[in-house]
Amino acid sequence: MQNPTPDRTRLPIAEATPPPATSLDVHSQDPAFEPARPLNAPEGAPNVVIVLIDDMGFGAPSAFGGPCRMPTADRLAEGGLRYNRFHVTAICSPTRQALLTGRNHHSVGMGVTTEMASAAPGYTGIRPRSAATLAQVLRGNGYNTAAFGKWHQTPARDVSAAGPFDRWPTGEGFERFYGFLCAEMNHWYPVLFDGTSPVEPSRRPEDGYHLSADLVDQAIDWVRDQRSLKPDHPFFAYLPFGATHAPYHVPKEYRDKYKGRFDHGWDKQREITLRRQKELGVVPQDAELAPWAEGVPHWDELSDAERRSAASLMELYAGFAEHTDDQVGRLVDALDDLGELDNTLFIYILGDNGASAEGGLGGTLNEHRFASGIPDSAEFINEHRDALGDATTHAHYPVGWALAMNTPYQWTKQVASHFGGTRDGMIVHWPRGIEERSGIRRQFHHVIDIVPTVLEAAGIPHPAEVDGVAQKPIEGTSMLYSFNGPAEPDRHRVQYFEMVGNRGIYHDGWMAVTRHGTPWEMVQDGRRRGFDDDVWELYDTNTDWTQARDLSAEHPGKLAELQQLFLVEAAKHNVFPLDDRMTERENPREAGRLDLMGERRSVTFHAGAKRLTEETAPNVKNRSHTITAEVEIPDGGAEGVLVAQGGRFGGWSVYLHEGRFCYAYNYFGLEVHTARSRDPLPAGKHELRMEFAYDGGGVGQGGTATLHVDGAQAGEVAVPATIPYYFAFDETFDIGVDRASPVTDDYPVVDNRFTGRLHQVRVDLGDDLHDDVTGGRARFKAAHD
């Protein structure tokens, strides 16, 4: 029994009404009952695969003229279409929320990343139920759905064993999820979720494990299951990689493929890339290189050591990109082997924002260290060159390479005003729906256009209601008209852009833009520029493809017209009030969002407590605090971790080593300060306490850690400086173990669980010194300049 004409405008679709019973005897029933049949998608609806690469610029992949070999992207482009005027939002969470909802990022509360959310309507980090996701709509119309990879849209305070889980992937329309819920991840030792359950890989790097390969393994297995068990049902597979976001973790053989290939430097690379882009036809023949960013050195201005370190980091990034694309190739091969590739609408988005400048002018071996204002020297990077890409590094390339990877455009990730931050390559492959092969589409489009495109291709209307909630209109424009209409005029004619105060407005080729901040200046000094002081630029991208020639002086009237249009669009989509805070908003109280711990000063964890993210763990930064563990030591002693937060790139740990009670504070991977009890602990029950007395005077100051065993002082260490803002996005707060990377080399990367009996751990917090955050930031920056 199936409803012959289901109403797809209201989800879930109403069940068909069975006929009434007409007899006491089933043999006399007329009409006979029919079995209830599952809901089917519309006839001819294709499978849908969306692959999203992280932190990749327009000029990086070979399919768009870049130096990073990506044979799968090349293959799909040769069999499908390249879109060369496709745009994103300039940073990750907003692009991903816009991608899956078809609405602008502020319209769905994701004006910035989840870790920077505030109470303002456009910045809450919470998707309104009036904006159902693509997965919810497709699942409600008979598709099977799954996501594998980076999910950076769940409100930060909800990422714990206490939930709620309604805005986890499995609550947002995906029947299966395998991946992580934060900004970035250690690709060698990831901390993952299968559905809502924490999991860790069973294999290790020495056995060939890598996260990108793992994600694709999971996706291939899932697709095969769908074809085996429900061959008449289409599927939607969403594969948002953590690559190529830092840390650049990749097998050595991929890094070595590029040895020496970037010794010519970033200035020359821009020229090479632009020439190749013109050969491919992805930019016009008269396209110019956009102006170089002020304050960024040219290649010939670097020392020999700086050129060596910069080239090495770019080799690493290119290898990371190629390795990721090779994993996509395995999925494409699996679809082909199943006979499903031709009937799969395969959308390959080569970047969720422009290339990232968050490694600073010289690059870094620890992205978190640089984000707190501490750069790495070229000599330091060169000393560790052989380790690049392994688990001991958390590397990010220099700004110069970010600019080159955004060729031919200006600026980088975060800068929503210029195409270097917002224009990325996209490939669409669908042989049954697209006639042309190796075509180029020049229509202006935006990531909010993906949802209406998929729905139109599947013959599914945008629902007016989902789960009883009236739906806001889709704000994107379907791209389906362009699939077989290369000369069709643009239908997406107006688009605003905004990210941390960087603004832009597009209308029929004209763009007015203003850059408010500099993306590699991660630590503010307490001074800020007012938005009224920002300088607006004007570009006619109908004749100036790359925003190379500012026309604001020649056309002040047009500039004023577009500035007014920005105000209208920004007001319509919840952009106001503008907010340019960066590191401040990582502190929930500064940002004005709810914190899972709230005002609690004491939290007790049982021994089996699940891992916590930094947003859901007690905040021990910039304040005095005490860690108390109740343990039982067996005969023969015990080893291992009682509680730890962060890892080898920054964090702290309370543990037993060689039977002694220890505390280690890892300062950005530069120094590890360790306190140890004088004697091993005897068998029996003990209360172990670490008291950290913070010096005060702002953020990132030092303190003294004192150890107590059963009330008696047992050890002490001075910590000269502490981590002020964030330990790590890809590390966790763990009870009884230290996951991902270790805080200290006193114990191994894995197999570091406490071998005694841990009854509980209590964390007591002292006064929060957040009220001096601005002055403390200025002092912290001055101390490390």
Image (cartoon, grey):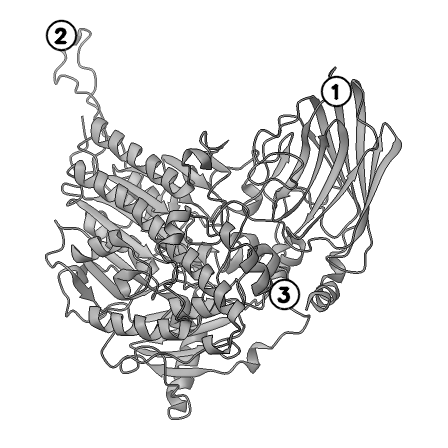
Residue corresponding to mark 3: 523
> Is residue 437 visible from the viewing direction of this image?
yes
Split into 4 quadrants, where in the image is the N terminus? top left
Residue corresponding to mark 2: 27
Tell me which numbered mark, 2 or 3, is placed earlier along the sequence: 2
Position of 65 with respect to 771 (left or right) is left
Measured from the top left, where is residue 47 in percent x and y? 22, 42
Position of 458 with respect to 184 (left or right) is left
Give the structural element (helix, strand or loop) at label 2. helix
Tell me which numbered mark, 3 or 1, is placed earlier along the sequence: 3
Depicted 3 relative to depicted 75: above or below: above
The residues bearing labels 1 and 2 have C-alpha atoms spaced at a distance of 72 Å
Tell me which numbered mark, 1 or 2, is placed earlier along the sequence: 2
Q: Nearer the viewer, residue 510 or 694?
A: 694
Measured from the top left, where is residue 379 in percent x and y? 58, 63
Three-letter code for the amino acid on which mark 2 is drawn: His
